[in-house]
Amino acid sequence: MLQMKLCGDLVLRQKCEPVSEITPELLRTLDEMVSMMGEQNGVGLAAPQVGILSRFLVMMDPDTKNVFRMINPQITSVSDDKCTMEEGCLSVLGADNLPVFSNVTRPESVTVEWTNENGERVGAQMSGLPARIVQHETDHLDGVLFIDHLSPVRREMVMRKVRKRK
């Protein structure tokens, strides 16, 4: 059974290794992550958030409800246009055990490539919320949290809420 890692756990700050082989265990883990994401009302979950230092993630497009199981995802291009939206994270919780949110500026659209669960290399152009989610989740694979994109003042405001939880 996978367990959610929370802000402060060092696993969230480590860079993940590429997946070299799609195994039945990996496929089971992806399915379990999709279930966890749904149970927590999330739209994305990356391997380090469940303590696994491998490059894979799951995400859902909130508009279409399509679920993506991305193995070795790579953002290959980003738009010059930026967009600021509220972000939260299942690993960054406040005293109420709910994600703490803050505005984050990111590219409006991205091109992403990944290997799917069938071992096929696929890609997509994403914009709006799906682009935001895939950027947030691929950041996790590099040990980056959304709070790292905040100004020092905003980051401290978020962390004050996180510390109240402990």
Image (spheres, rainbow, N blue to C red):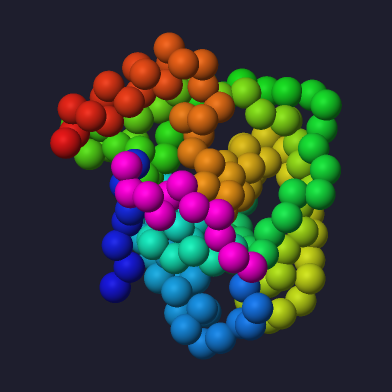
Residue 15 falls within the magenta-colored stretch: yes
Which range of residues does the magenta coloring cover?
8-18
Is 162 placed left or right of 48 in the picture? Answer: left
Let me know if residue 9 is in the magenta part.
yes
Q: Main secondary structure of the magenta part?
A: loop
Nearest to the observer: residue 32 or residue 20: 20
Q: Give me the residue at 63% from left, 82% from top.
A: 21
Residue at image position (79%, 71%) is: 121
Residue at the spot x=43%, y=12% of the render? 153
The spot of residue 139 in percent (x, y) is: 58, 45
Give residue 39's quadrant in the image. bottom left
Residue drawn at the location 32% of the way across and 42% of the way down: 8
Q: Is residue 16 visible?
A: yes
Q: If the image is split into quadrants, where does the N terminus sit?
A: bottom left
Q: Position of residue 53 (x, y in %)?
A: 49, 64
Q: Is residue 64 above or below residue 82?
A: below
Residue 37 lies, in percent from the top left, at 41, 56
Q: Position of residue 85 (x, y in %)?
A: 56, 24
Direction from residue 66 to residue 125 in the image, left or right: right
Q: Quadrant of the C terminus?
A: top left
